[in-house]
Image (cartoon, rainbow, N blue to C red):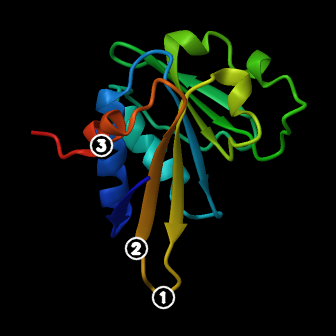
């Protein structure tokens, strides 16, 4: 597991941008963290790294949104109200042709892929402190630790 300290929303967006720049069609990302942790902010950065233009909003009430990217689309989902018994694969058509980011995705990830990037965002508890720890770990054959480190590295 690799941990990155993030001090504010701008840094969270920048981290997402670095991740997005290295993601490719078929990649899946599972985001976990408490309400307000920064999951959607990170996703906005991922979208920017993929070349998505226009606003990216939380898919809480629609479950899934698709955004056209420069070379690959972004599918942004919220699985908060879903369970592993739901047929989540129907919610995310053509996942192999897009990057899929699923907030609260732990129960449904196996419906999308047998390999994904697990990202947990932990918010510190100090009053007025915006610091978060972003913990990343690859799950499955496509996510060796070296790939995760490469995605998290500073862009040249």
Q: Are marks 1 and 2 in contact (CB under 8 Å)?
A: yes
Depicted 81 relative to depicted 10: above or below: above
| Position of residue 152 in the picture relative to residue 96 (left or right) | left
Neighbours of disc 1 within 10 Å: few (<14), some (14-19), many (20+):
few
Q: Secondary structure at mark 2?
A: loop
Q: Position of residue 105 (x, y in %)?
A: 68, 41
| Alpha carbon separation for disc pair 1 and 2 | 9 Å
Mark 1 — residue?
126
- Which of marks 2 and 1 precedes in the sequence? 1
Residue at point 78%, 16% (across, down): 90
Q: Secondary structure at mark 3?
A: helix
| Alpha carbon separation for disc pair 3 and 2 | 21 Å
Q: Which mark is residue 64?
A: none
Which of discs 3 and 1 lies nearer the camera? The answer is 3
Q: Position of residue 88 (x, y in %)?
A: 78, 25
| Alpha carbon separation for disc pair 3 and 1 | 28 Å
Which of discs 3 and 2 lies nearer the camera? The answer is 3
Mark 3 — residue?
149
Q: Position of residue 101 (x, y in %)?
A: 55, 34
| Position of residue 148 in the picture relative to residue 105 (left or right) | left
From this viewpoint, which residue is outermost toward the bottom? 127
Residue at point 30%, 59% (across, down): 11
Mark 2 — residue?
131
- Which of marks 2 and 3 precedes in the sequence? 2
Neighbours of disc 2 within 10 Å: few (<14), some (14-19), many (20+):
some
Residue at point 45%, 85% (across, down): 128
- Which of marks 1 and 3 precedes in the sequence? 1
From this viewpoint, which residue is outermost toward the right? 85
């Amino acid at each position: 597991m690799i941990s990155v300290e993030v001090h504010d929303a701008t840094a969270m967006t920048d981290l997402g941008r670095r991740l997005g720049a290295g993601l490719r069609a078929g990649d899946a990302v599972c985001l976990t963290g408490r309400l307000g942790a920064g999951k959607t902010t990170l996703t906005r950065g991922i979208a920017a790294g993929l070349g998505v233009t226009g606003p990216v909003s939380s898919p809480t009430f629609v479950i899934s949104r698709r955004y056209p990217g420069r070379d690959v689309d972004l599918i942004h989902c919220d699985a908060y109200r879903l369970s592993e018994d739901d047929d989540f694969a129907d919610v995310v058509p053509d996942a192999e042709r897009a990057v899929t980011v699923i907030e609260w995705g732990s129960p449904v990830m196996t419906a999308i892929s047998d390999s994904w990037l697990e990202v947990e965002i932990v918010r510190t508890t100090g009053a007025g402190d915006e610091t978060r720890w972003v913990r990343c770990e690859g799950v499955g054959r496509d996510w060796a630790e070296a790939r995760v480190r490469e995605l998290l590295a500073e862009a040249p």
